[in-house]
Amino acid sequence: MKVLLSVLLAILACDQVVNGYRILGVFPLNGKSHWVMMEELMKGLARRGHQVDVVTHFPQKTPIPNMREISLKGSVDAVINNLTAVDIQRFGALSMESLAEIAGMRICKLLGHPKLQDLIENPPQDPPYDLVITELFAAPCYLAFGRHLNVPVIGMVSSVFHDWLNEMAGNPMSPTFVPSLFSTYDQNMNFKERLLNFLLTNYITWQMHYYTNSQLELVKKHFGIDVPHIMDLYSDVSLYLVNSHHSINGIRPMTTGVIEVGGLHLKDDDDPLSPEVQKWLDESKDGCIYFTFGSMVRIETFSKELLKTFYTSFEKIAPTRVLIKIAKKEELPPGLPKNVMTQSWFPQITVLKHKNVRGFLTHGGLMGTLESIYCGVPMVGIPLFGDQRVNIQNYVNKKVAISLESIDDVTEEKLTSALNNILKDPSYRKNIQKLSKMYLDRPSSAMNTSIFWVEYIAKYGNVLKSPVTRLHWWQRNLFDIYAFISLVIIVVLYLALFILRTLKKLVFGSRACAKKDNAAIKSKKNK
């Protein structure tokens, strides 16, 4: 019996390998917060039995079956626990040009890395790749892998769908009710907001395509591919997997090739708490606030005055306790309140799921706030840069968070008031628990949905691409139709006017002639 069982398992394992696809995941962006979504999908595909090769800056500590990593670790600085308060101010003032340079051109230059050069020049043939999956942000140069390998491309978007991707995917651009990625408006905009949203959406779209177009020189250099414009590379994208969901991001027009898989990174098997933290939380009978600015930002680098403000506010909410992620505790000023515990890292979902955690003090990063919604924990937001202000404002509109607007607006009074409101007003917890249920109530999990569509594209190719992407902008917006109809109306009106004038001359002209003839006859008789 044991022998038979072993044979059956061996057959199943072989069947998985035979029927599995070979997938190349290309994720050269050095931001950990972006990687967490991509990482989960790659691991999920490997567990499914596909052979997955992954380009990443964050190799696994323990090898994963069916997953081979092409590590770029050390080629550029990984953005983990190394952003200071000074960096935050610089990032907060980033223009689209700077974003396209830092997260675009600099990342594209990694195509010259020896490991990527080997991948380009000597792609595996035993078997060859069936599919490429890459992140779509500011480095569309990596879309060239699909054309180079002659396979479909799947693009992953770690936030709500980017403004500049709508035209590429064939999505209707709807600034009348869909807020721009960098807009804090909700979906009920007045005239002024719709006007500004329209201008912002189109301006950002133009800027991103304009500033990333220079990446074509690297595409030509490393792949030998000539394309007229960077936008042409998007024509190889067969599917978009987007980290959004209607319960949070509202109703948006999406083509068949754009799939919402918000919360793909969420999972129940997060790491356990250390005994020290477990004991601390279990004994937090009056509740606990969890405070972190994410995987990148070092809270201890902010000014002593601001840190003292945090200290005072945390003391005032005692006996409620506070957990803070601090990379280097020794850099904190003295006077840390007794109701505060710090550590360099916490298993975040495990912390947020603890029954005694009553609030989440956050910078508003998308991944962390989605985890807060997943666990049903209301938030106090202090946005720092990027999409964080937009995220927090969205949660404020849904009455699951309180915003302090920016790090410069933090005072002891505002922070203490916000924390007390979250702790004492049950409506915030009730609202976010309802939102959590809506967010998670789906016919299939984000992971299963993602894997289904990845396999669908691997089977059938670029079949979900909207036909509208083959049209020029004036055709897409029906300007040629409107122009034709307008021309027809003008011609018809002109002909109608011409006929009326002709009839008028015929009718009234003949009468005038008759009157003249009668007058002439009368005149002759009088003579």
Image (spheres, rainbow, N blue to C red):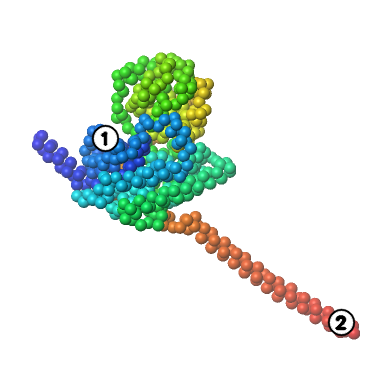
**Quadrant position of the C terminus in the picture:** bottom right
Q: What residue type is disc 2 on?
A: Ser
- Image point (76%, 76%), residue name: 511
Residue 39 disc label: none
Q: What residue type is disc 1 on?
A: Gln
Q: Mark 2 highlights which residue? A: 523
Query: Disc 1 and disc 2: Cα gap in Å?
Result: 115 Å
Left or right of 513: which side holds 26?
Answer: left
Near mark 2 (Cα within 10 A), the count class, few <14, some 14-19 or many ≥20, is few
Q: Mark 1 highlights which residue? A: 60
Mark 2 residue element? helix
**Quadrant position of the N terminus in the picture:** top left
| Residue 56, image x, y percentages | 30, 40
- Image point (78%, 78%), residue name: 514
Identity of the residue furthest to the right in this view: 527
- Image point (42%, 41%), residue name: 160
- Image point (77%, 76%), residue name: 512
Q: Is residue 259 visible?
A: no
Left or right of 411: which side holds 241?
Answer: left
| Residue 106, image x, y percentages | 37, 44
